[in-house]
């Protein structure tokens, strides 16, 4: 039985990155291949690209999902429709169902339901919610940054290739990439594919149970088109940029297995609540680029499943000793799938 405490580790608080570096491609990159590790740089990423590889990015765009309404701070995380979303709010149980809250620009928000895990189901009385959020919302910076949004977060807490709106947190491994680095990948003879997973509570919600079999992931919407699936299925290797890209790919791989399809993946456009822990058999992804993750988080569990828990413990100990920067605005690591997976 896996326990949440199996994935705990010591992290000095001063290593948590609260601000981005001046340049996107200035980050360090720790390369982890089995128990071998090497200190490199994100600009070296292309040195690991081979002709025929497919590099998969998550192109979801972060919305200014945090806002005030009648004195309550709310952060949206999962869409039910264009105007109905789930949102997290402190002391949400004290807000009556059916009550109307008012945003700073006068937009009325009706409380439709409450849930202990998802917070409030909210209906927005407006024609275009994203227009409203662009006016009065803030970028939903993670709480461990311990600061309010600043002007440059609108640009830096967003990938340079972000397109479809819908995420309440950035797919942070992609924050390191510049247009020049994206072009360099293709110049090496690799394909770039941009799938979509709208990041919600499933990606970052903390695990509240010691027994991992009792943890329930929130669902997040993801999509791989038929044309993208064809490219992925003809890949020499698949390199996922970020855990959300990996979870999208592995969700499509599970569907492929269920329907008996050949290849790594099938096209999908659905919600996924995939929870990857050690023992999971990877079918779609060969290499993963990802940031450094929180202790006891589902994301550290995922990378431990991919590269091996012992290997990741060793790599993270090295990263702490070498003062790598952790979490969303931090450095990254390039992980190779452990032997036997």
Image: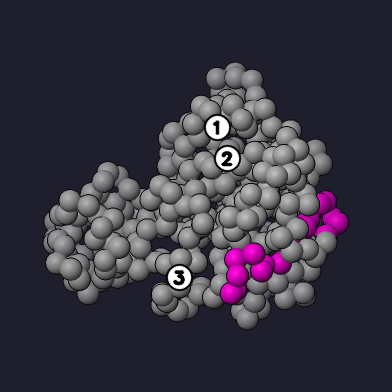
Tell me the element at label 1.
helix
Looking at the image, the residue that sits furthest to the bottom is 14
Mark 3 = which residue? 153
The location of residue 136, given as percent across then percent down, is: 26, 68
The location of residue 197, given as percent across then percent down, is: 47, 45
- The residues tagged by marks 2 and 3 sit, at their Cα atoms, a distance apart of 25 Å
Crowding near pointer 1: few (<14 within 10 Å), some, many (20+)?
some
The residue closer to the viewer here, 186 or 242, is: 186
The residue closer to the viewer here, 307 or 237, is: 237
Mark 1 = which residue? 228
* Drawn side of residue 272 relative to residue 78, left or right: right
- The residues tagged by marks 3 and 1 sit, at their Cα atoms, a distance apart of 31 Å
Q: Confirm whether residue 89 shows in the render.
A: no
Tell me the element at label 2.
strand
* Drawn side of residue 129 relative to residue 226, left or right: left
Determine the residue positioned at 72% across, 39% down.
189
Q: State the count of labels.
A: 3
Q: Any magenta on residue 35? A: yes
Q: Any magenta on residue 2? A: no
* Drawn side of residue 57 relative to residue 121, left or right: right
> Mark number for residue 193?
2
Please tell me whether residue 87 is drawn above or below residue 150 in the rendered image.
above
Determine the residue positioned at 70% across, 72% down.
324
Quadrant location of the C terminus in the rendered image: top right
Residues drawn in magenta: 21-37
* Drawn side of residue 236 relative to residue 92, left or right: right
Asked whether the beta carbons under mark 2 and mark 1 sit within 8 Å of each other, the answer is yes
Tell me the element at label 3.
helix
């Amino acid at each position: 039985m896996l326990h949440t405490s199996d994935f705990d580790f010591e992290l000095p608080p001063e290593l948590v990155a609260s601000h981005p570096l001046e340049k996107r491609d200035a980050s360090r990159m720790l390369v982890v291949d089995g128990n071998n590790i090497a200190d490199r740089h994100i600009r070296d990423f292309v040195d690991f690209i081979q002709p025929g590889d497919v590099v998969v990015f998550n192109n979801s765009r972060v919305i200014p999902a945090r806002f005030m309404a009648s004195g309550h701070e709310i952060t949206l995380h999962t869409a039910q429709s264009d105007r109905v979303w789930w949102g997290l709010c402190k002391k949400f149980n004290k807000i009556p169902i059916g009550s109307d809250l008012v945003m700073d620009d006068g937009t009325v928000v009706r409380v439709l339901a409450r849930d202990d895990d998802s917070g409030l189901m909210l209906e927005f009385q407006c024609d275009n919610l994203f227009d409203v959020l662009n006016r009065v919302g803030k970028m939903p910076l993670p709480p461990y940054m311990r600061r309010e949004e600043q002007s440059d977060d609108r640009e830096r807490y967003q990938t340079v290739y972000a397109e479809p709106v819908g995420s309440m947190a950035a797919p942070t491994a992609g924050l390191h990439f510049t247009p020049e680095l994206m072009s360099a990948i293709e110049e090496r003879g690799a394909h770039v594919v941009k799938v979509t997973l709208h990041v919600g509570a499933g990606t970052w919600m903390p695990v509240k149970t010691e027994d991992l079999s009792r943890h329930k992931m929130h669902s997040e919407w993801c999509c791989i088109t038929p044309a993208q699936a064809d490219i992925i299925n003809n890949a020499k290797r698949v390199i996922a940029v970020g855990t959300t890209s990996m979870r999208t790919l592995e969700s499509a791989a599970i569907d492929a297995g269920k329907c008996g399809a050949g290849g790594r993946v099938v096209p999908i456009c659905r919600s996924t609540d995939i929870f990857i822990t050690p023992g999971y058999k990877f079918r779609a992804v060969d290499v993963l680029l990802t940031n450094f993750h929180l202790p006891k988080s589902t994301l550290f569990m995922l990378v431990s499943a991919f590269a091996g828990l012992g290997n990741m413990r060793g790599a993270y100990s090295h990263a702490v000793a070498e003062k790598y920067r952790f979490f969303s605005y931090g450095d990254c690591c390039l992980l190779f799938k452990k032997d036997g997976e």
